[in-house]
Image (cartoon, grey):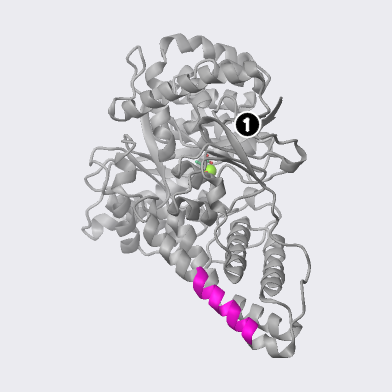
Amino acid sequence: MEILKGTFAFEGIVVGRIFLDKKELSNKGITALLDEREIDGEIERFRDSLELSKESLERLKTSLAGKIGEKDLEIITAHLMILDDPVYISDIEKYIQKNRTKAEDSVKIVTDKYISLFNKLENPIYRQKVLDIKDVEKRIIKNLNSKKNEWADLNGKILITEEILPTELLNMCQENIKLKGIVMEYGGETSHLAILAKALEIPTLMGIKNIFSYDWKKDVILDTTEQNSCVIIEPDEKTLEEYKDKIEKFNCKREEIEKSAFLPAVTLDGVNVSLNMNISGKTTKEEIDAVTPDGIGLLRTELLYMKNNSFPDEEEQIASYNDIIKNFDEKDPIIIRTLDIGADKQLPYFQMKNETNSFLGLRGIRFSLSEKNIFKTQLRAILRTAYGRNVKIMYPMITNINEIREANELLKEVKEELRQEDKKFKDDIEVGIMIEVPSAVMMADAFAQEVDFFSIGTNDLTQYILAADRLSETVSDMYDSYNPAVLRAIYIVKQAADKYGKSVSICGEMAGEQKAIVAFLSMGITNLSMVGGSILVARALVRSLDYTSLKNVKEQILQCSDSNKIKEILKKYI
Ligand code: PEP
Ligand code: MG
């Protein structure tokens, strides 16, 4: 028996037969050279394959509409754009012509050139582009051979693979091939694949290094629960027996979770917990109604700016914010965060200065204060959207008190302008800041006197406290939000806010993790904002906890100096 630990994308426990997907895309080098007379035919064959690829993607998009969220379907649109890219297509055609290589080889060689080009670019946006172009390459090659679909064999099995591409998963879904689980070598927690695995509810384990170096036997236990996140190769009788029990318990818990969807998030001893949703772009009413959040705890406005060709004007922003918040009640709290651009989030139409370390450079509020007109336009749009609603403003990446004061000064100016223009806006709008950097933690008591609320961004707070890049694979082990330094920092912020009667919420990814929810409640933090997909599990967990008795958990974790010990303590409550 061997237990391999990884990270989970969607929780589940299954026992089943595996499908070992050891095939590699290519790397075989050039397979054959064409005769001069075959070249035109080969280009024709390549064009047919492009058409087939486009048709199949269009079909896929139509058939999945309604089954998968609109945002997830954007992957297909991105792939269609690559298939229509005139430069990419003509590069491949020219390659066939010039080198007399078969279409498969030419596609592979040209695509590899693009991939190595994107890999050289430091901007992480291009990492996603690499995955997209690999996916498209695989599709074109598959259609060149127009091989019959081999996926039927996968039905009901646990796929063991280096990497499965998002559209492959979507295709399987369309063809009613149901994977029982996925164990894979690659894939970050925020990758498209992880998001899709969640949407399709496939228990998925990621990050199993050198996956084919293990002696895979026919059957495995795949346990992608947050507590265990492992795959067990060749389980012994005793473990199989234990798992029968675990599966039953897990299924009961799932039923409880589903039942609690429309019940209040209140602990056993009657404490209300506010569960809000993090939203970045358009989200449908169905997606919101399925999880019934109390409001929006973090509306990231970057996407609106990133998908545009120029800075969105005031009216465009108002329309876009209204489109997102229209599915919420007027009284529901909606926190709109001002533009958090810079570092990994760049605008295609605005060239930022190259910086050695862009995460420590001009980002978040620093950018807004350096581009005052752009900032003022956004403040106007938020103030006007907020009219008659419970909308609040939040500034990202605050590191010193002058930034808060300067931003608030501009807010005052903008309000005055709107008054002069007789425009309707929310004069008494609440203003908050994100706590994401160590200086904000240390100065929280001073900052609390300048704002109405704090929201702790644990994604950035973890990276800045631990000096571990949140996107880096090399230091991913060090990037650990359960590090006692991070938890102590959160508690310092909570105490400072309490002292001045200000509210604190958490809006980093951690807010949706069960272990972290136990820790936050133990510290008295009862306002959380997370991705929609985590809300039901969070609500069921809240309903199973006794708030008062968690107080001693706080004492225990704040005394710990080892994150593993902290996780062990927290695990007992979920
Ligand atoms: C965070 O840093 O925790 C956060 C919520 O902001 P973002 O992930 O958008 O940087
Ligand atoms: Mg952040």
Q: Nearer the viewer, residue 224 or 461?
A: 224
| 37 left or right of 128 in image | right
Vertical placement of 76 versus 467: above or below? below
Question: Which x, y percent locates residue 126?
Answer: 62, 60
Question: Which x, y percent locates residue 290?
Answer: 32, 39
Crowding around mark 1 (Cα neighbors within 10 Å: few <14, some 14 to 19, many 20+) is: many
Residue 391 shows in this picture: no
Task: Confirm if mark 1 falls within 8 A of ligand 1.
Answer: no
Question: Which x, y percent locates residue 436?
Answer: 55, 38
Q: Nearer the viewer, residue 96 or 369?
A: 96
Farthest bottom residue? 37
The span shown in magenta is 41-53
Residue 492 shows in this picture: yes
**What is the count of numbered marks?**
1
Name the amino acid type tagged 1.
Val
Quadrant of residue 188 within the rendered picture: top right
Tell me, yes or no, whether the highlighted magenta stretch contains residue 56: no
Vertical placement of 345 versus 557: above or below? below
Question: Which x, y percent locates residue 187?
Answer: 62, 46
Q: Quadrant of the N terminus?
A: top right
Q: Nearer the viewer, residue 403 or 287?
A: 287
Q: Nearer the viewer, residue 567 or 334?
A: 567
Residue marked by disc 1: 220
Q: Main secondary structure of the magenta part?
A: helix
Quadrant of residue 428 within the rendered picture: top left
Vertical placement of 235 versus 57: above or below? above
Callout 1: SS: strand
Residue drawn at point x = 28 percent, y = 29 percent: 262
